[in-house]
Amino acid sequence: MNQWKAYYKFIKPYRKWILLTLIIGMIKFTIPLTLPMIMKYVVDDLLTSSTLSVQEQMSQLVLILGGTLILFIIVRGPVEYFRQYFAQLITSRILFDLRNKLYAHLQKLSLRYYQNTKVGEAISRFINDVEQTKNIVEVGMMNIWLDMFTLLIVLGVMIYLNPMLALVSIAILPLYAIAVKILYKRLKQLSKDRSQALAGIQSYLHERIQGISVIRSFTLEKYDQQQFEGINGNFLNKAMAQTRWNAMTFAVINTLTDIAPILVIGYGGYRVIQGDLTLGTFVAFFGYLDRLYAPLRRLINSSTTLTQASASLDRVMELMNESYDIVDSPNAKTLEGPAKHIRFDHVYFKYNDQEDWILNDINLEIMAGETVAFVGMSGGGKSSLISLIPRFYDIQEGSLQVNGFDVRDLTQDSLRRSIGMVLQDNFLFSGSVQDNILLGNPHADNKEVIAAAIAANAHEFIMNLPNGYDTEIGERGVKLSGGQKQRLAIARVFLKNPDILILDEATSALDLESEHLIQQSLQDLSSNRTTLIVAHRLSTITHADVIVVLENGSITESGNHQHLIELGGSYARLYNVQNLDT
């Protein structure tokens, strides 16, 4: 029930439009209901009349046909157009609002959620399941009410024409109710299973396309095809289970529906033969019978559609209700002034409660304008430590402060605006070179973009691209080399011009020549701002004011390069292993 309340929030702004659409729909559905009564009049009062002359019969028939054509062409046409238009407008607007809200929600979910969730699964809920929920409005809040309105009108007219024959017509309705109760009990779960299986295909496809180069380099095409056939086969099984149930449902419902006309023909024909019922009334009644069971069939189909939509709504709301790991506190402050001073005070951190500590009792003070480098073996906690500063994760114990404020007491927006990061895995978006650099500052002008590219030693290679800064780089920057992508990522940070600079293997994708070109740029960028560097290539951090050695989540050494070399500990061993000792 909670998911329905949550969904109603998206429907509420359009209640008046829904009501208007229902009124238009009532007019549209009422117009065809006049046909059987017209037929009754034509049969009883014209065709079988003994008091009217042929000329009078023809003139009245032409008059009736003219009025009917006006009703069905001039009136019904525009009414049908506006009913369809408003129905689609409302559902499209609701889906627009829902997707906007869902996307904003996805933006706020922590990195932990994305580490534990397949991208294709989230995309499937965002695209397929959201699209299915439109039937809750279109079918559940419009079509069902219009069909029920039609049923009531038809039943009223049928009772007016002949109460006993009307009772015969609806004699099978209890069987309908029993069939719906039995057959639709499993349909929601079958629909949910099908959606889950479809999400599995999308997740697998998304991941494999991203890693197609790995598949080809290991000649895994045949093996991967077999794996996909298994996942695709699972979807086929789920889809066929739902199809079989649907087919059985429609078979039962349609069989029950076909019984009613037979009963009416038998009983109505008997009454006409006995002279208790006029031929025109019998013809009109049979016409209304179709208009009784057509909306009834639609109501049964609507049950199927709504069951499937309800299953999709469950999946959408499961995503919508995913809690945020990182939230601003009620009294969160905006970080004012340049963010420069960072302090780790007895910080403990782990990604979840089942794991051991990733960081143990970290005590570190980084002064304004200092360059601090973090080194150590892989898995020592370097990347985890720097990801705490922009509050991608929250620590479990201790305090992490920026400018004297605990980061948990600052708004995420103001904190992250003051931090620029070049991560180990540089992600570029599809679009042009300029589009990607502008991510550093979407409001920058062309001159600022070019200046940032020049500072990152990227301008020269950009100008050699087919369309310069307007060159499309493909998904994830696939058309660029690793070094080119890295320099664009650095140019973004130049454009952002942050107070705190974090470089996580910022030159890892560069060859020695490119690295040499960019080191000076990074040093220029680091000047007059607090800089944190994670590096495996120790030659890139010998200039740092402080070098911190992390081993197994703990700080084992710290000092400048010369001090650590003289100390002869872990740093000195790493340095000598890389043959950097001159």
Image (cartoon, rainbow, N blue to C red):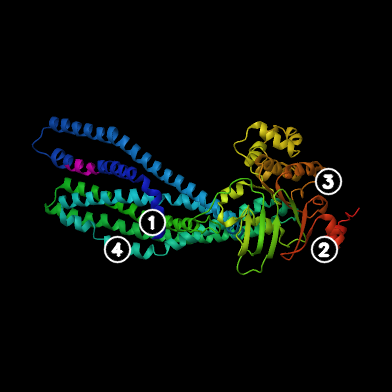
View extreme (right): residue? 582
Sooner in the amino-acid sequence: mark 2 or mark 1: 1
Of the image marks 2 and 3, the number of the one nearer the N terminus: 3
Q: Nearer the viewer, mark 1 or mark 4?
A: 1
Q: Residue at x 63, y 45 (%)?
A: 338
Instruction: Give the side of residue 41 with respect to residue 394, left or right.
Output: left
Quickly name the residue at label 3: 512
Q: Is residue 108 left or right of residue 94?
A: right
> Do labels 1 and 4 touch, CB within 8 Å?
no
Query: Mark 4 highlights which residue?
Result: 175
Q: Rounded to the nearest whole Å, what is the CA distance between mark 2 and mark 3?
A: 25 Å
Q: Secondary structure at mark 4?
A: helix
Q: Classify residue 181 by image quadrant.
A: bottom left
Quarter of the image with the N terminus is bottom left
The tag earlier along the polypeptide, 2 or 4, is 4
Q: Amino acid at mark 2?
A: Ser
Determine whether 35 is above or below 367 in the image. Answer: above
Q: Main secondary structure of the magenta part?
A: helix
Upstream in the sequence, badge 1 or badge 3? 1
- The residue beneath circle 2 is 570
For the residue pair 193 and 415, the one nearer the viewer reads as 415
Span of residues in magenta = 33-40
* Residue 156 covered by magenta stretch: no
Q: Position of residue 525 (x, y in %)?
A: 73, 42
The residue wearing badge 1 is: 5
Q: Nearer the viewer, residue 41 or 336?
A: 336
Which is more foreground, mark 1 or mark 3? 3
Residue name at image x 19 percent, y 51 percent = 156
